[in-house]
Image (cartoon, rainbow, N blue to C red):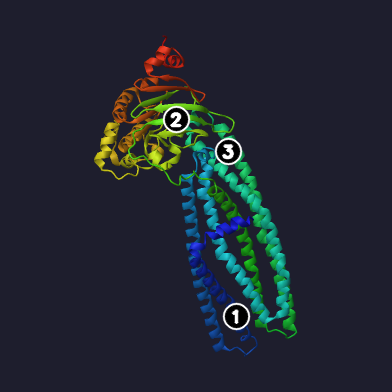
């Protein structure tokens, strides 16, 4: 068990100490009234032994005391559960809030290199397991320990020698529980890691079922899934077997303790050194004394899982976030003069993608970036938006280094339409506005400019039509139009169009291109395009290959050079020139 993880998890309790103190107080009161019950039972037994010696008045009073103690103990038990629940679920709420906030500050490098299903598993499954462990711990661990201590006190009060038998045999149960708990911890850690791997694989396959079916990859998927699932099965069997072993193991030890108490107590009663009622009370305490050990062994299993889950969550929380600019610079009036100077970048150390890149875009210019797959087009866009930072060199906007700007401010300067359109579950109106408080007339105007208004009005509920998760009830082209309308509503000073018309038919593409021409007027624009027909009006075209600009100029200039762009352009149309 990681002590640092345990201390850190406990530190989350600080804001909710009042609930902890209340739970401990109610638990103590519940235990007191529970432990009084065997005393009253023993006294009642002593008053009904022997012919003609039954004291009915005293017996009725003892029954009232027993019933009252049971009722009060149950009320306090309910209060313990209530207060511990409030504390536990407040802590898990805080953990989820911190973790979700962390996701928004993680570098894209980290997000891209980790399975999304595993990241989701930490947010949902791991924190659920932390909550279950804390709930078990606070509702049972304290009450179990307090019950043990209280029971020993009452047993010492009744008969010291017999109580000493119980105390001497107690460490056996603790040793057994501790040894098993230590062995299960590593298996629970392995199990959680495999759950994350399985979640990531399932999420990936479900999200790409069209591709899976198109390539007939179902059988291979099943084999891979079963391999991961089998490893999870083996790890689960081992961890659950050892976890389940704790309870019966402690029960064996506790049964030995109970049998010893029965034998010793019977001898004391026969010798006249203890009453039958006192023995009855002592046996009740011996029985109560063994139960907390069984509960504590279960708590250890839950806590092992909770700490293993917490270690995964804290590891993610401790991951370095995007660096924060302490004194960020802003631009009073953005003109859009962009300079890329001596830029170098690599995703993996020693595998350079972009080297010594120099580009300048004057305010209002349109810069198109073309080239074969993997040449660095999208990477350059990522660097402009500071999704990644360069290894060397700098990017300036109106003379201000983008690395001296706050990322949120920088990204707000660009309107970005991506190749992969993204919509969330909500109405079409909400998707176009995307969290901005704007009049409905502005939303409609943006949709009309993006040529999306017509298809929206053909839908049953128009702008109030609900979009399913990731826009599953719309075509790819319709989703792209809504994303373009979203950018048109923003009216940013600069634009980035990454294959913005890739999923739109030729007729609609012409309409969108006209809308883009209007929107791009006076705005510096970077266009990543495979369809070279869409960039013929660009002020400059950058032809990239292996992270270098191999050609640069206007459309007609590059065609006249009869170089790489000339070959790329005519091969796209299967023309000879």
Foreground residue among 217 and 544: 544
Task: Give the Cα distance between marks 2 and 1.
Answer: 87 Å
Query: Badge 3 local density, few (<14 within 10 Å), some, or many (20+)?
Result: some
Q: Which residue is mark 2?
A: 340
Decide which of 48, 296 is in the foreground and name it. Answer: 296
Q: Residue furthest top?
A: 577
Query: How far apart are the two marked residues, 1 and 3, measured between alpha carbons?
Result: 59 Å
From the viewer's perspective, is 346 left or right of 300?
Answer: left
Question: 48 and 29: which one is in front?
Answer: 29
Extreme front residue here?
399
As rendered, which of 43 and 417 lies closer to the eye? 417
Image-quadrant location for residue 37: bottom right
Q: Determine whether the residue tagged by mark 1 lies in a helix, strand or loop.
A: helix
- In the rendered image, the quadrant that contains the N terminus is bottom right
Using the image, determine if residue 371 lies above or below residue 164: above
Q: Secondary structure at mark 2?
A: strand
Image quadrant containing the C terminus:
top left
Give the image location of residue 113, x and y in percent: 54, 38
Residue 139: which quarter of the image? bottom right
Location of mark 3 (residue):
225
| Residue 139 left/right relative to 507 | right
Give SS at disc 3: helix
Question: Which residue matches tag 1?
Answer: 41
Disc 1: CA contacts within 10 A as few (<14), some (14-19) or many (>=20): many
The disc, 1 or 3, on the residue closer to the chain's N-terminal end is 1
Which residue is depicted at the point 33% across and 33% down? 335
> From the viewer's perspective, is 275 left or right of 7?
right
Q: Position of residue 203 (x, y in %)?
A: 50, 40
């Amino acid at each position: 068990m990681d002590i640092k993880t345990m201390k850190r998890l406990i530190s989350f309790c600080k804001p909710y100490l009042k609930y902890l103190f209340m739970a401990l107080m109610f638990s103590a009161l519940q235990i007191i009234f529970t432990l009084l019950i065997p005393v009253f039972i023993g006294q009642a037994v002593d008053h009904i032994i022997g012919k003609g010696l039954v004291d009915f008045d005293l017996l009725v009073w003892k029954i009232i005391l027993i019933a009252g103690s049971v009722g009060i103990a149950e009320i306090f038990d309910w209060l313990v559960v209530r207060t511990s629940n409030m504390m536990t679920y407040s802590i898990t709420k805080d953990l989820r809030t911190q973790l979700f906030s962390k996701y928004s500050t993680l570098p894209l490098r980290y997000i891209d290199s980790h399975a999304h299903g595993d990241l989701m598993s930490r947010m949902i499954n791991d924190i659920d397991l932390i909550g279950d462990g804390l709930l078990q711990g606070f509702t049972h661990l304290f009450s179990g320990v307090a019950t043990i201590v209280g029971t020993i006190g009452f047993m010492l009060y009744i008969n010291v020698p017999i109580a000493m038998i119980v105390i001497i045999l107690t460490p056996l149960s603790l040793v057994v529980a501790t040894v098993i708990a230590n062995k299960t911890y590593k298996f629970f850690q392995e199990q959680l890691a495999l759950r994350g791997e399985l979640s990531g694989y399932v999420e990936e396959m479900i999200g790409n079922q069209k591709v899976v079916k198109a390539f007939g990859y179902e059988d291979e998927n099943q084999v891979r899934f079963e391999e991961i699932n089998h490893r999870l099965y083996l790890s689960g069997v081992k961890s659950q077997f050892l976890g389940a072993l704790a309870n019966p193991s402690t029960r064996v030890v506790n049964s030995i303790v109970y049998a010893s108490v029965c034998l010793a107590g019977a001898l004391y009663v026969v010798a006249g050194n203890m009453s039958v009622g006192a023995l009855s009370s002592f046996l009740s305490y011996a029985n109560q004394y063994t139960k907390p050990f069984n509960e504590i062994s279960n708590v250890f299993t839950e806590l092992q899982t909770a700490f293993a889950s917490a270690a995964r969550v804290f590891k993610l929380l401790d991951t370095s976030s995007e660096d924060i600019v302490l004194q960020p610079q802003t631009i009073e009036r953005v003109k859009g003069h962009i300079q890329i100077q001596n830029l170098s970048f690599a995703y993996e150390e020693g595998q350079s993608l972009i080297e010594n890149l120099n580009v300048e875009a004057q305010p209002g210019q349109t810069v198109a970036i073309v080239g074969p797959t993997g040449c660095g087009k999208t990477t350059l866009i990522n660097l402009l938006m500071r999704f990644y930072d360069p290894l060397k060199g700098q990017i300036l906007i109106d003379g201000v280094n983008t690395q001296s700007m706050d990322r949120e401010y920088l990204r707000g300067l660009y309107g970005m339409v991506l190749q992969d359109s993204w919509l969330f579950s909500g109405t079409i109106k909400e998707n176009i506005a995307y969290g901005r408080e704007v009049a409905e007339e502005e939303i409609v105007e943006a949709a009309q400019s993006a040529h999306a208004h017509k298809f929206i009005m053909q839908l049953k509920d128009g702008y109030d039509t609900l979009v399913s998760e990731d826009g599953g009830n719309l075509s790819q082209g319709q989703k792209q139009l809504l994303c373009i309308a979203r950018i048109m509503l923003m009216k940013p000073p600069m634009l980035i169009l990454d294959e913005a018309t890739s999923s739109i038919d030729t007729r609609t593409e012409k309409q969108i291109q006209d809308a883009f021409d209007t929107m791009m007027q006076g705005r510096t624009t970077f266009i990543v395009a495979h369809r070279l027909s869409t960039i013929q009006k660009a002020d400059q075209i950058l032809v990239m290959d292996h992270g270098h600009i191999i050609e640069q100029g206007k459309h007609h200039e590059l065609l006249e050079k009869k170089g790489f762009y000339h070959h790329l352009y005519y091969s796209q149309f299967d023309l000879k020139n």
